[in-house]
Image (spheres, grey):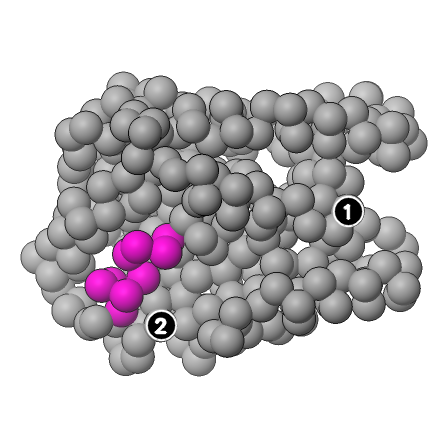
Amino acid sequence: MTIVMNAFRELQDRYADADSRFFESGGFRVHYKIFGKGEPLIVLLHGSFLSIRSWRDVTTPLSKKATVLVFDRPAFGLTSRPVPSADNSARYSPEAQSDLVVRLIHEAGYEKAILVGNSTGGTLAVLTALRHPRHVQGLVLAGAMIYSGYATSEVPAFMKPLLTSMSPAFSRLMKFLITRLYDRNIRGFWHNKEALSEKTLSAFRSDLMIGDWSRAFWELFLETHHLALDKRVCDLEVPVLVVTGEHDLTVKTEESLRLAREIPGTELEVIPDCGHLPQEETPDAFVAVVMSFLQKSMKVL
């Protein structure tokens, strides 16, 4: 185990950028970056199969009037990928990831933050606000997965021991499937697919496929369970902005419209000519709606 961890640390150090930072938390060596300074703190949570890179076009403009923290979620990017065992505390569950968000807030020297989550990152942003309300100042939910996918999937309890015992075999199968379908899956996030360059797609693929990445993704899968967020979003007591691409096919636009209706006092922005990743496909429009929300509704800028 120590040899594996040291090998991945070498990969982290080799591929880290000049502004990369790392800290140890919950069995992981977490990769993150900080831009800007001062209040408020904005934490950006990327979706599945992606990485810090998903926010590359919005961190600088958002950080002109705030501190912005981006990080690679467990199983993605340069954050380490330990296999859970009796020897370490690493856990890939949604709850463990929400706890990690709070530790990141503290690592940055803050008590609370505005969480901006895209896709499954939006799932975790909502979960964190529900589990740790005093540490969440507001939410921006872009194509947040609340009524489908990651938020509602579940590995049946009676099957988990069998699946766990066969983890090496299933992780190899997952590696084969993800490798074969990865490019098509990422392109499906975009409405204007020609705007996604082969260079960017290749970079995202490289961000994911580091070390024993398929085993880490398998561990993430094993920890999925129905979060019942559809019944809990009405309990949110912070300002919320829901953002959706007009042509989001991954988390259908109708789901985001429903989310905006079911969270009291929520603001809604529909970005035209855009799919599932507004921060990538229409970064200027995304920054504009987020900044307007922070200024007018949250009055924090």
From the viewer's side, name the closer residue of 107 and 183.
183
**128 on left or right of 156:** left
Say which amino acid is labelled 1.
Asp
| Residue at 87% from the left image edge and 28% from the top image edge | 169
The numbered mark at residue 35 is 2
From the viewer's side, name the closer residue of 222 and 127.
222
Q: Which residue reaches farthest front? A: 198
**Of helix, strand and loop, which one carries label 2?**
strand
| Residue at 28% from the left image edge and 39% from the top image edge | 281
Q: Image height check: is 142 above or below 66?
A: above
Say which amino acid is labelled 2.
Phe
Q: Quadrant of residue 145?
A: top left
**86 on left or right of 11:** right
Q: Image height check: is 164 above or below 104?
A: above
Q: Is residue 9 magenta?
A: no
Question: Residue 1: where, in percent of width, then height?
Answer: 90, 59
Q: Quadrant of the C terminus?
A: bottom left
Question: Residue 176: where, in percent of width, then height?
Answer: 73, 26
- Magenta region, residue range: 55-63
Q: Which residue reaches farthest left? A: 296
Residue corresponding to mark 1: 212
Q: Residues within 10 Å of mark 2 (few under 14, many from 20)?
A: some
- Report the Cα–Cα distance between label 2 and label 1: 30 Å
Q: Residues within 10 Å of mark 1 (few under 14, many from 20)?
A: some
The answer to whether residue 43 is visible is: yes
| Residue at 41% from the left image edge and 66% from the top image edge | 69
Question: Residue 283: where, in percent of width, then height?
Answer: 24, 47
Q: Earlier in the sequence, mark 2 or mark 1?
A: 2
**Of helix, strand and loop, which one carries label 1?**
loop
**137 on left or right of 15:** left
Question: Residue 25: where, in percent of width, then height?
Answer: 66, 67
